Amino acid sequence: MLRNVVKKLTKNLGLKILALLFAAVMWMGVVNLDDPPMNKKFTIAVTVENEEAVTSMNKYFEFDSESSNVTINVLGKRSIINDISASDFKATADMSRLIQRENENVVPIEITALRYASKLTISKRTRELKVTLEDLMTQRFVIQPVAQGSPAEGYALGDMSVAPNRITISGPKAVVSKIDSVKAPIDILDMSTDITDSVMPVILDKNGETIDTTRLTISVEIVTVRVDIVSEKAVPIKVNYSGKPADGYEVIAAKADPATVTIKGPSDILNTISAISIPDTDISVEDADDEFEQKLDINRYLPEGVSLSNSSQATITVKVDIEQLERRVIHVPTRYIAVDGLPEGYQLEFNDQNVDIEVYGLTDDLNTLSASALRPVLDVSGMEPGRHVGQLQLTLDSEFIVGDTSVSFTISSDSNDDETNTGTDDVQTDIDSDTGADTGSDTDVDQDDESSVDDSRTRIDDLANREEE
């Protein structure tokens, strides 16, 4: 029975095989009529893998702009082709497979289908992508906060901070080497309170021009900048000095240039500051005989918590003006001398008609000085009859230094008071009538003026002696 079955199956075997093949072709023809094969092009972005293989060689790589995408031709059934898109493919550039040739560098691109991989035919699955290699450079920079604009009137820029305050930048050496600074700008125009804002760092070259960052890898994209807005105030600079100039010289003025500075700080501290004082220990005029200048850092004299609004004005110049004194001898008639303290029953007679008084001062001041302006007074309180030598007291401003004011006179008693008494009112009247001075002016010299005259007398004596020599 089995033999009969085999015999029937192998009978006309060639015809049967031919019929089978014909049936298969007919089936495929029918199928293709409903879902025929077709081609379609897809453009795929190249994905880079294993970049560290190049950066470990301290190299920066870059694809040609035209090679960042690849276009492939895909063959498949219409139903499948219509169901896929570029996202169903992947083009991978594995940098660990970089090939460095004499004239060019290339990396293979492997194209794979993520769907229907077995049912699709991809032309040129492996391609080469040209790669440009450059030296790689990585640097760290401090981010500098920069204020743009000016605060409201009466306020100034205080402390500024940025967080994070450092940034790492990597890229081609030709680009990174041009970076000079990284700044974080913040607008403070018309602000009167503290500010905090998020800003994007700006990368600049040495000319202050912005550098293109498209080829750079930057560790920080956004930073936070904080700005303190404080009060400000303009105050004068007061100059003090110590010592005495050389004999015959006087300090005319000691001034700072600039004469005022603008300071900033907390308002409660600024309200207590009326001037910036330079101590006398820092400026000495000892034995000076000519004008001089001295530069100082004003920051040394600012209270804690206070600073200059403009730090470039920290250095000031102290100018000390010293001039030589001129000697002038003024001849004063003794009848112009007022007498104090002469008891009743006594009379006083000067032994000379004139007394010479040496006065030292500046030329312009001496030119305006007259005998009547001296208003000399002789105090004879407690003196007994006889010949005496006394010192005159003068009423002069502090810019004058007076030399020897001694005068010789004789006191005698006389029973005829009306004829011999010399009173201060009569003498002062003579002075006023002769010089045209105001008769209502006081002729007394207070104790402070007398002390000033005594303090300068020794110094003037030395000057007078040298001039006589």
Image (cartoon, rainbow, N blue to C red):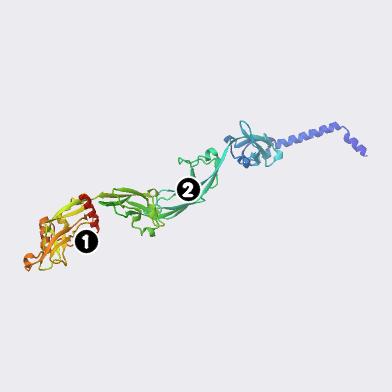
In the picture of the structure, the residue carrying the numbered disc 1 is 450
The quarter of the displayed image where residue 395 is located:
bottom left
**Measured from the top left, where is residue 173 in percent x and y?**
54, 39
- The residue at which mark 2 appears reads as 144
412 on left or right of 162:
left
Which amino acid, by three-letter code, is at mark 2?
Gln
Q: Nearer the viewer, residue 456 or 237?
A: 456
Tell me the quarter of the picture where residue 17 sits: top right
Foreground: disc 2 or disc 1: 1
In this rendering, does residue 94 appear at all?
Answer: no
Q: Residue at x 31, y 48 (%)?
A: 292
Identify which residue is drawn at 88% across, 36% down. 9
Dot 2: what SS?
strand
**Rendered-image quadrant of the N terminus:** top right
Q: Nearer the viewer, residue 201 or 450?
A: 450
Residue 296 image offset from top left, x and y in percent: 37, 50
Amino acid type of the residue that numbered disc 1 sits on in the rendered structure: Glu
Task: Left or right? Give the position of 237 relative to 148.
Answer: left
Image spot of residue 373 (x, y percent): 16, 56
**SS label for mark 1:** helix
Q: Position of residue 393 (x, y in %)?
A: 18, 60
